[in-house]
């Protein structure tokens, strides 16, 4: 069988390798098949504890949220020998609910929010499995590690919350970045975290914008138990931030184009081709004028966002700001994102601010 979990580092290089690993007599006993517990309960329980804690700790240290017996057997080889007792270890971990077959784990989530996430997760891992898959062919979710890593992701997201009114919504890409900062790199592990967080009502995934084309994640606010639906003010601020990010992307591309034009202009001048150089110079000036206008728009957006973040978000202010960005949303719907549209929206928001604070 080909293992489904990522390839692990050699166990000998593991920082928390148990001290017993270097004791041949002790390890021969730990590698052997289990005997009936009634014959020696103390030895049986000690062996069970050794392997249970060693496997879970090893997976935690190596960022693994899923395991299977073939992978553990291959990773814990010692002097040409493989452990013969892992089926019993896995059976005990399953009884303790520390290991859950992936198929069972994903099936149990079907009634939770956005079950499509679980379907995506289950597809590559469990489509080939039946409900009676032999234990040595099963892939297991390490529940306690999924829960622990999910909490770490939430804490990472919450550490960047300064204004709970609208800082608890981020782009989906920003959410993935937070996962990677928590040492989650493969898609299956990230999907497991998403699944657990949705199940526990710690996040929700939605699409915002008039065409619902911006994928976002809202997470539970600090000091609260469950995530709440996205509010109108959050939706409005998200659109402002998204507009700013798109303009910044356009500016970056313009800068690259200008640098390319400068290189070509110098080359043409070096070759005494002034006509071609002048043509490119005019194009460069057009791009520079457009960039100046976009930079001004970005500055205006930064100012508006800063003012919103510094405002006491009472119900009146929230409603006023929500109304103030309706012009922006309408322009986006009709014409797409343009600097002029964003500037008009900014004027609308400034009018609302003057009305509120006059």
Image (tube, grey):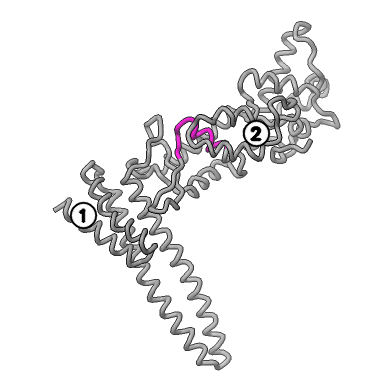
The 10 Å Cα crowd at callout 2, few under 14, some 14 to 19, many 20 or more, is many
- The residue labelled by disc 2 is 66
If the image is split into quadrants, where does the N terminus sit?
top right
> How many circles with numbers are drawn on the protein?
2
Tell me which segment is drawn in magenta: 192-204
If you read the primary sequence from the N terminus, does the residue marked by circle 1 or circle 2 appear first? 2
Say above or below: 338 vs 309. Answer: below
What's the CA distance linking mark 1 and mark 2? 52 Å
* Magenta-drawn stretch contains 153: no
Say above or below: 247 vs 178. Answer: below
The image quarter in which residue 47 lies: top right
Q: Position of residue 288 (x, y in %)?
A: 41, 76
Residue 136 is left or right of residue 208, and the answer is right
The 10 Å Cα crowd at callout 1, few under 14, some 14 to 19, many 20 or more, is some
**Which residue is located at x 24 percent, y 59 percent?**
348
Viewer-side label of 1, 2: 1
- Are the residues at dot 1 and dot 2 in contact (C-beta closer than 8 Å)? no
In front here: 326 or 343? 326
Looking at the rendered structure, which numbered label has been put on residue 126? none
- The residue labelled by disc 1 is 352
Q: Position of residue 238 (x, y in %)?
A: 37, 50
In front here: 79 or 22? 79
Residue 331 is left or right of residue 79, and the answer is left
**Which residue is located at x 62 percent, y 34 percent?**
65
Say above or below: 15 vs 179. Answer: above
Identify the residue at the far top of this view. Answer: 38
Residue 284 is left or right of residue 315, and the answer is right
């Amino acid at each position: 069988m080909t293992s489904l979990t990522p390839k692990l580092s050699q166990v000998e290089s593991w920082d928390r390798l148990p001290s017993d690993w270097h004791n041949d007599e002790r390890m021969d006993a730990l590698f052997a098949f289990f005997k009936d517990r009634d014959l020696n309960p103390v030895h049986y329980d000690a062996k069970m504890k050794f392997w249970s804690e060693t496997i879970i700790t090893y997976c935690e240290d190596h960022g693994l949220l899923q395991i299977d017996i073939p992978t553990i057997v291959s990773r814990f080889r010692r002097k040409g020998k493989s452990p013969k007792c892992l089926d019993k270890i896995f059976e005990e971990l399953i009884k303790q609910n520390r290991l859950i077959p992936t198929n069972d784990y994903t099936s149990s989530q079907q009634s939770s929010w956005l079950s499509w996430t679980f379907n995506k997760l289950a597809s590559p891992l469990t489509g080939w499995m039946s409900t009676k898959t032999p234990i040595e062919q099963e892939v297991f979710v390490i529940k306690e590690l999924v829960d622990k890593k999910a909490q770490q992701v939430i804490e990472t997201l919450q550490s960047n919350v300064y204004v709970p009114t609208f800082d608890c919504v981020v782009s989906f890409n920003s959410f993935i970045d937070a996962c990677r900062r928590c040492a989650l790199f493969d898609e299956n592990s990230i999907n497991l975290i998403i699944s657990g967080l949705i199940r526990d009502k710690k996040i929700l995934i939605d699409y915002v914008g008039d065409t619902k084309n911006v994928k976002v994640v809202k997470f539970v606010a600090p000091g609260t138990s469950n995530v709440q639906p996205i509010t109108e003010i959050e939706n409005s601020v998200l659109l402002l931030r998204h507009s700013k990010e798109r303009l910044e992307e356009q500016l970056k591309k313009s800068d690259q184009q200008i640098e390319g034009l400068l290189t070509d202009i110098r080359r043409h001048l070096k070759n005494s081709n002034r006509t071609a150089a002048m043509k490119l110079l005019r194009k460069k000036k057009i791009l520079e004028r457009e960039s100046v206008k976009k930079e001004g728009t970005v500055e205006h957006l930064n100012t508006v966002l800063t003012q919103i973040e510094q405002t006491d978000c009472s119900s009146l202010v929230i409603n006023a700001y929500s109304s103030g960005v309706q012009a922006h949303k309408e322009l986006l719907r009709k014409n797409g994102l343009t600097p002029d549209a964003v500037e008009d929206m900014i004027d609308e928001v400034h009018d609302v601010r003057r009305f509120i604070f006059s």
